[in-house]
Image: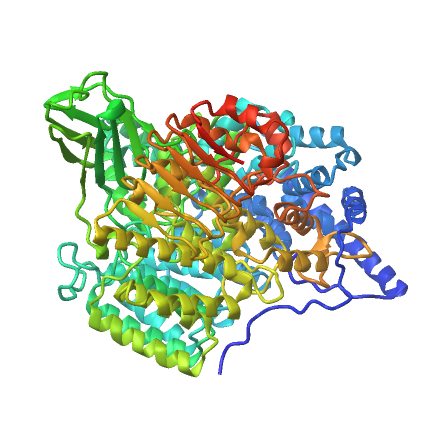
Amino acid sequence: MHGRVKVKSTAQQEEEKRKEREKKLKVYLTVRDAIFKKRSNSELDEEALQLTQQLLASNPDFATLWNYRREILLQLETVKEEEEMQKLYETELLFIESCLKVNPKSYGSWYHRGWVASRLLRPDWQRELGLCDRCLSLDDRNFHCWDYRRLVVKVSGVSVEQELQFTDRLIGSNFSNYSSWHYRSTLLPLLHPQPASDPASACQKHTHTHTPPTVSPQMHGHRVCEEQLLKEYELVQNAVFTDPNDQSAWFYYRWLLGRAEREELISCVYVSREGERVAVAFSKPVNVVSLMLVLDGQPQQVEWRSVHPRLRHSPVWLCELPPGSISDINNEHNLTVHWPEKHTHRDCALYTGRMESWCRESATDQELFRSELSVEKTSVLQSELQSCTQLLELEPQNKWCLLTIILLMRALDPLGHEKETLTHFQMLKEVDPMRSSYYSDLCSKFMIENTILKMEYAEVRVFSLSDKNLSTLCHLDQLLLVTHINLCSNQLVKLPLQFAMLHCLEVLEADDNAIENLDGLYNLPKLEEVSLKNNQISKISDLSPLATCPKLTRLDLRGNPVTKTADIQAELAELLPSLTDLLL
Amino acid sequence: MGTQIKDVVIKPDAPNTLLLEKHADYIAAYGSKKDDYEYTLSEYLRMSGIYWGLTVMDLMSQLHRMNRDEIIDFIKASQHECGGISASVGHDPHLLYTLSAVQGRLDAVDVDKAVQFVLSCMNFDGGFGCRPGSESHAGQIYCCTGFLSITGQLQQVNADLLGWWLCERQLPSGGLNGRPEKVRHPHTLTDFITSLPTFIYTVGIESLGTPGEIDTRFSFCAVATLALLGRLDAVDVDKAVQFVLSCMNFDGGFGCRPGSESHAGQIYCCTGFLSITGQLQQVNADLLGWWLCERQLPSGGLNGRPEKLPDVCYSWWVLAALKIISRIHWIDKAKLRTFILACQDEETGGFADRPGDMVDPFHTLFGVAGLSLLGDEQIKAVNPVFCMPEEVLQRIGLHTDLLT
């Protein structure tokens, strides 16, 4: 029951209504029972069509009745002449149309219409498109009708180009039509695909203009060629300048700014003589039981595991080599990790005298976080940024514009724009307080990306990001090689499971947060010092993940509720026997 | 210039405390209206009604007020020979009502048959229809051959025998040879097979020979039913996953079918589906989470799509999806709670879609379940994937994946 306003009525009105309903109920039940009886007797005749029509006219969601009608119609096909059937189906279409007028959102009616339309001897798809037009002119967001339209388009071979023009028309008459923008996002990559080899090359119109099997604009990394993109930016600019508070065009804008997903590859192989461990990082979370490891030309029997048993898909996987394989520091070794599923591999050489080694994908800063950034030329993005900045001057409180500016700045020069980005995030939280946690998390993500970029430029293994209002941690797979991390004075509430990817971590400083959960401090083989002053750790059991870190010697828990626990010294001595330096 | 935001205004005298007792009274009395006209009109969804009632009563610790035996008898009477369960006695079996029955009373269902039914609803493209091919065997053969031809396993079919079968039967125009026109009268299996790719790729809607309406809702219904029955291994999960992923959109959301617009109800189904099948890492959680938290309107209520009115049932669909992808903190919980509470009817009990509208059991469940996700301690904890009390799932040992 949606959108039915409750109205007060007098006792007399109530009584009248009651009587009326009683009468209606009687009729309804008589017809329903007659239908059920006929069906159980397998009577597939025109009388049953009449009866079901009676009920469906007011109750089109009674799916069983539509099923019955289809059975009857199929039966009649076997006994009637084709022309007769054509007429019968035409009548059926009129009936469905009347049902759709009563309830334009009935799944059953729309499904039945598609079925009937396609059974016609001479299907009239033009008429069906006309019906969709009429229906969408009454409610341009009716997704049942949109889906039906897509079906008709597919079956009747309407070209993608025509459909794109259709969305042009709808968007032109009303920018605030999310359904049309959505439809565009599915059509554009079909009509103007970005050439796989050269993203910047000219647009080629796709040769087959009929709609092929639908592809997901998210999943298949389908992008649009640059020339068309410029036109799309223009369209979006028109929309957002006309109505800067309408979200449809902004959502579409964000999609245009996005770029193809990073391909699946092995981004890093790390090997350590100590413990004879190998860690492999991937560009995405994966589940790779089939990974193959070759050491000095010999395939090795190893057992791969994700960094944490609760992460079935992880961007980092670990294994131990058979004892003695690489322990002698005087030997040089060559290691190759093969990922047969993706036909890819990565080599790593471990030289004599070195305790550890790694080989990484040489990602530039542009590529590192590229699934979030834009592929377009700087000049294009610059001009987009200029337009948005103009709009912001007119509409200084517009959250959509603020967010888009942040995204454009990140695509152009994330480090150069860091200060302005932070100011804009502050503003966003003020104008849209309901979503302040979203903005905090997004800002944290960008700050982490920036810090990773800085770390890359400096070629160090220290990650320091203190006093930046971090509310969440992400991209931890990029920190596989980090030995020191400083996260002090932020707003973190936990060290998530993914923290277990910091396989080389020796020192963790995370004072002055609100951390209550340490699940990610799991199996970190080199972790020696942990400082967690002034956090929210309240129970001894919260510290139990630390027991899996064999080298832990120093732990600072001052200012945590847990320090009030009776007998804490003794309990911790038992839980963490390697500790030599405990500060409570 | 600008579009007015569609939203409601919450009046100062709107309810602002949870009226649990009234809601329990409302649900307990609902089933006694059997002679009511409107009640009868909703017979086509009765099984879901039973699930809504049972679950909301359980969440409010009032399950003892429901007539257990009557419900079990009703479910048993609604399970068909094929294993599927219908909305009510006399109606056709349907995947949605099969799930509702299993969610309501697991113990009233014939498990093996129900599993068979769910499997028979799978389409060759990995999608699920609401019911199996109900026509001739030809329909199923069509399905199988379609599937085999796509996977390149057609040699497994005894073509001669099948061709003979098809010709001999002089198939009625339904089922197998119904559409498109080109295969209306296939003379040989080869004719039939060669026309298959066109058929499969041009016809988005299925003939009676294949599962009815295909929809990601039914993908969810199928795996949720199997998971509750402890038989998820019975289905080709990879294929089903591929279908759901092909419904992912530019905004990170999901629609009914490939190409369909994102909708919070479908997003709940698809994230729930990916949770059950262990594939949540496929979701673009930051993008989807942004779209979902933008569903919150100034009144605090959530809508299901951009530029739509808020509705209590989206307190469930949006919130559960956010919970599944671990981003529930991206909305303003206090404001949503205010909106949900304002949708209560102080006189009759129950929740409406919006303040001042008529109440019904559907919105009553999703209002209460939404409050549970928001952490209301007067209500039992609800599972975001199955929309059932957590304790029930613990009892049957079903663990739920949330994005970490």
Q: Which residue is most to the top?
A: A323
For the point 75% across and 35% down, which residue is it?
B63
Q: Which residue is most to the right?
A: A11
Task: Check the image and report above or below for A436 versus B69.
Answer: below
Front residue of A103/B297: it is B297
Front residue of B346/B15: it is B15
Q: Quadrant of the C terminus of chain A?
A: top right
Q: Quadrant of the N terminus of chain A?
A: bottom right
Front residue of B283/A297: it is A297
Image coordinates of residue B103 in percent, x first then y, are 61, 35
Count of marks placed on residues:
0
For the point 75% across and 68% down, which residue is it?
B12
Name the quadrant containing residue B308.
bottom right
Image coordinates of residue B140 in percent, x first then y, are 39, 33
Name the quadrant containing residue A106.
bottom right
Image coordinates of residue B297 in percent, x first then y, are 57, 65
**Quick check: B300 left or right of A289?**
right
Image coordinates of residue A48 in percent, x first then y, are 59, 46
Judge whether residue B134 can be spotted in this image. no
Front residue of A29/B211: it is B211
For the point 76% across and 42% down, which residue is it?
B31
Q: How is the image coloured?
A: rainbow
Task: Check the image and report above or below for B200 versus A444.
Answer: above
Judge whether residue A255 can be spotted in this image. yes
